[in-house]
Image (cartoon, helix red, strand yellow):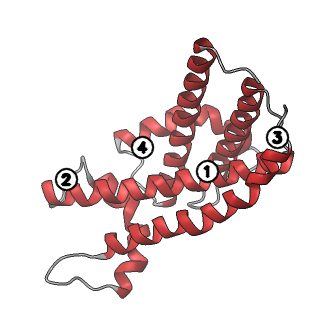
Amino acid sequence: MEAMTPIGQGGLFLLQFITGLIIFSLMLRFLLRASAADWRNPIVTFVAKVTNPLCAPLNKILPARGRWDWAAIGTALIVQALFIVLIGVLTGKQFAVVFIVLGSMTEILNQLLDMLFWLIIIQVVLSWVSPGNNPNTAIFEQITQPILAPFRRYIPPIGGMDLSPIAAIVAIKLTQIVVVGSITQFIQPMAQLTTGS
């Protein structure tokens, strides 16, 4: 297979960027609903307005149940699957359906874990530089509270310092390495077996 031209590489980059932006927005929508974030917050309102048209078709099949916006997850999986198919077209490869499905699920899980990791980091930094009740940063506390709550039950503050974010970050990274890494290793041969010459 011939190397991609600069135009092809530029198109690939643009495709990756747009896909990443869409999936980021959908994952953020899912987390905002799951954490019962204040929908009057400008950030939450913006995310909802941007993602509503994307989620509308699946909302008819997978309506939101309580805090769980399954339409956002389903839409993200479809977008990621289409991205994998388009990558195959651009690079001259053909992927098995099983690889596309499992690859999409793995990538969405990995991106969700990445987002949780960075949200916790941002929340910790903001708690240092802007302690107290700040309406502009409260959204990060609202999102990370359900994630940190289980760790806070078993890890009490030491010297007034909350160590639960460290434990949560370690758990997230271990999940990425062990769980996501294992699934990726399992499905990799499926891509190699179906690669065109």
Residue under the image location 54 percent in, 50 percent down: 111
Spatial separation of the CA atoms under disc 1 and disc 3: 18 Å
Q: Give whichever of discs 2 and 3 has the lower sequence position.
A: 3
Front disc: 1 or 2: 1
Neighbour tally class for label 2: few under 14, some 14-19, many 20 plus, Cα within 10 Å: few
- Residue flagged by tag 3: what amino acid is it? Phe
Spatial separation of the CA atoms under disc 4 and disc 3: 37 Å
From this view, report whether residue 44 is shown above or below residue 140: above
Image mark for residue 108:
1
- Residue flagged by tag 1: what amino acid is it? Ile
Spatial separation of the CA atoms under disc 4 and disc 1: 21 Å
Q: Nearer the viewer, residue 196 or 104?
A: 196
**Residue 191 makes an appearance in the image:** yes
Identify the secondary structure beneath mark 3. Answer: loop
Pinpoint residue 68: horizontal percent, then vertical percent: 60, 59
Q: Give whichever of discs 2 and 4 has the lower sequence position.
A: 4
Identify the secondary structure beneath mark 2. Answer: loop
Which residue carries the number 3 mark?
A: 95
**Residue 69 makes an appearance in the image:** no
Pinpoint residue 197: horizontal percent, then vertical percent: 84, 31
Identify the image quadrant of residue 57: top right
Which residue carries the number 4 mark?
A: 44
